[in-house]
Amino acid sequence: MKTLIALEDGTLFTGRAFAGSGEVYGELVFNTSMTGYQEILTDPSYHGQIVTLTYPLIGNYGVNEEDIESWKPHAAGLVVNEASRMHHNWRSTGSLAAYLEANNILGVDDVDTRAVTLHIRSRGAMKCVMSTTDLDPASLVAKAQQSPGLVGRDLSSEVSTPDPYEWPLENPTYRLAVLDCGIKRNQLRMWAERGVGAQVFPNQATAKEILAARPDGFFISNGPGDPDTLPQVLRTIRELVDHGLPTFGICFGHQLLALAHGGRTFKLKFGHRGANQPVKNLQTGLIEITSQNHGFCVDKDALAGTELETTHINLNDGTSEGLRHQQRPMFSVQYHPEAAPGPHDAAYLFNDFIQLMESTGT
């Protein structure tokens, strides 16, 4: 089924729907990972976005129930060069196309994804509409221009859990209070593997509600949208850090921690999305290859005068990839140490936080 992809600047791409039909809108972004498309689709951080995968053949190993990162796919749509018509893997339980169909996600292939990526890298991520029903270029461009972008939108509250819940683990060594801003399940799995239990709270939970659970530490997850749209969440975070509760944030959590302590964030031109981003640890001098997915970034030059300092930087563009509090037991990173299928260079951060909880005696 012919599909038209229209960007807000008037650029058009054509393709064919290999899964689903209809019309969807979102911010068009690209991800450079060679594998892990199921992680990408089910990552709540992609809520409100249409994802272009740069690897030319997608879907050849199918899908399974073990690799999902949340209760459903969150990407608004998927754009690939070629969707594999065959899938084979000993863990596979179905095809990518059938999975998208079952979840009402529009998948489009036969697209020049190299041209899409070059355009976004040149002009920046932008609002997009893709449709199998409206093939009028002028109409679709107008729809793209009128669609909501990401700046100023609280998307985190749309994907956060509505009620607290426990991640099952018997006899945990430590207990974490987890603020769900759009959490990936592998973060909870990695805590459990290390003997750390987790009580997950909605992103609008108060400091009083969280402290009532008597946690040993506080963890802030990844999530979608503009981090500067959550004043209540920022107040809660500041109260808990000032209380002395050991705190660790990933991605969106990193941005929220910076904002809660007087920092600033800004929107990147086309974001960092892929499994091959080089990051330098300024404390050790070591380089980590990391998985990333973010369109907003902490302004590291705006940390002067705060109690925060930069600990990691992106070697591609020098942007913030980590920070720590100079007085409180708190640190965060912009990238994803829990990435599945990987890379796993940064998994040590989970152990570092356990040691931080041990040293503070909580």
Image (cartoon, rainbow, N blue to C red):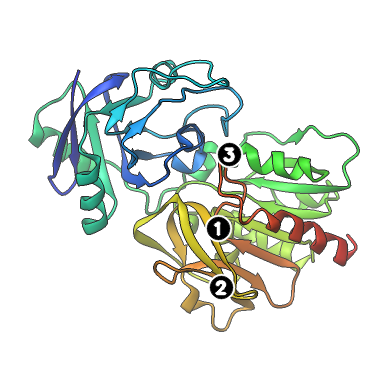
The reply to whether residue 56 is visible in this rendering is yes
**Contact, mark 2 vs mark 3 (Cβ under 8 Å):** no
Q: CA distance from mark 1 to mark 2?
A: 12 Å
Q: Tell me the residue at 27%/27% (across/down).
A: 108
Q: Disc 2 marks which amino acid?
A: Gly
Give me the residue at 65% from left, 71% from top.
324
Disc sitting over residue 262 in the figure: 2
In the image, what residue occupies the spot 45% across and 69% down?
A: 315
Of the image marks 1 and 2, the number of the one nearer the N terminus: 1
The disc placed on residue 23 is none
Amino acid residing under circle 1 = Pro
Instruction: Report if residue 198 is visible in the image.
Output: no
Q: Which residue is mark 3?
A: 160
Residue in front for this viewpoint, 323 or 54:
54
Return the x and y of residue 117 as percentages of the image width and height: 26, 48
Where on the picture, by quarter, is residue 115? Answer: top left
Helix, strand, or loop for circle 2?
loop
Gap in Å between the C-alphas at discs 2 and 3? 24 Å
Vertical side of 93 occupied by 306: above or below: below
First-in-chain label (1 vs 3): 3
Horizontal side, residue 306 vs residue 226: left or right = right
According to the image, label 1 marks what residue?
231
